[in-house]
Amino acid sequence: MNLFIFGLGFSGRTITERRLARGDTVTGTVRSREKAAALSAAGITARVFGPDGRDDTIDADIAGSDALLISVPPGTGGDPVLAAYARQIAAAPNLRWIGYLSTIGVYGDHGGAWVDERTPATPTNARSIERANAEQAWLAFGAANSIAVQIFRLAGIYGPGQSQLVQLARGTARRIIKPGQVFNRIHVDDIARAVDASLDRPRSGAIYNVTDNEPAPPQDVVTFAASLCGVEPPREISLEDAGLTEMGRSFYAESKRVRNDLLRNELGVTLAYPTYREGLTALRAAGEGPR
């Protein structure tokens, strides 16, 4: 399979490495020439799509692709990939699958109640509104061009180098308390498993919540990470006293519990890390966290 990924960030890079291990050909984009050179040195074919311009070879990459994954954020002007390459994508002769990495933020705030894929998207902040608009644009594009588009609504992503264990090691972990607040999370390896399953079983117009099985208060996750390391957790601090940035406050403005039944039952995904406990325990065993 020839897979092209717009956006070789944390999730895109993990998906790339997993698909390369399966024998696929994977090419992806980064925002700068320096990042492209670094990935090429690591054996990953990278193109530039960003402030440094666009590589001319992307047109040919799209034309030769069987699958396309979008892992770049939209902006006020809409989805940048559709704006730049809609014509080329529509004309790609072998393209049978498009995946779009979105966010559970499109559901907005539900006061801690459960939501699933049937819950209407009611985003409240600008970033989530842009994501919801991009989802609809890609679904409409797929319907108009008879290409199976799948939407993956991701929970808070963690994994190697990006977890509460790393924050504890850096001294930046905080236990911010907002009564009733819960989040879902997802290990980056389980995102890759979800993409694998969908590539094997595409469904036009599909939307999947890619989350763990246990939404939990954020302070509980920090406490568990500290217990794995044998250190005292940071002191509790109220949301009002946390001094969060506008973006940080926006995360705490929404609380919901997100079901992943469709991911598990339709796609047959068995999460390697069904809760934060398994995920953090594996990361600690790999050496992450304070020494």
Image (spheres, grey):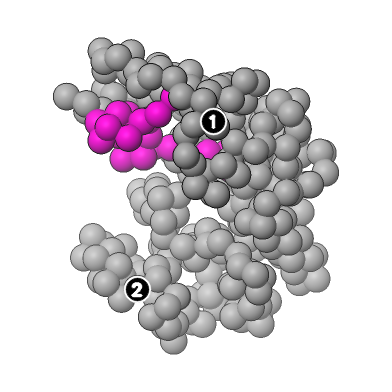
Considering only order in the chain, which callout, 2 or 1, is on the residue closer to the N terminus? 2
Using the image, tell me which numbered label, if any, was put on residue 131.
Answer: none
On residue 239, the disc is: 1
- Image coordinates of residue 61 in percent, x first then y, are 47, 76
- Give the residue drawn at x 59%, y 80%: 84
Between residues 184 and 25, which one lies in front from this camera angle?
184
Residue named by callout 2: 32
Q: Residue at x 60, y 65 (%)?
A: 74
Determine if residue 142 is in view: no
The answer to whether residue 249 is left or right of residue 222 is right
Q: Quadrant of the C terminus?
A: top left
| Range covered by the magenta-colored residues | 153-175
**Which quarter of the figure has residue 16?**
bottom left
Q: Amino acid at mark 1?
A: Leu
Q: Quadrant of residue 63?
A: bottom right
Distance from the alpha carbon under mark 1 to that under mark 2: 37 Å
Query: Which corner quadrant of the image does residue 159 belong to?
Result: top left
- Residue placed at 36% from the left, 51% from the top? 17
> Residue visible at 67% across and 31% down?
255
- Residue 194 vs residue 173: left or right? right
Q: Residue furthest bottom?
A: 56
- Element type at marker 2? loop
Near-viewer residue (259 or 261): 259
Q: Is residue 159 in view?
A: yes
- Disc 2 packing (10 Å; few <14; some 14–19; many ≥20): some
How busy is the neighbourhood of tag 1: few (under 14 within 10 Å), some, or many (20 plus)? Answer: some
Q: Position of residue 58 (x, y in %)?
A: 47, 79
Report the residue that reaches farthest toward the left: 291
Look at the picture and state if 20 lies above or below 116: below
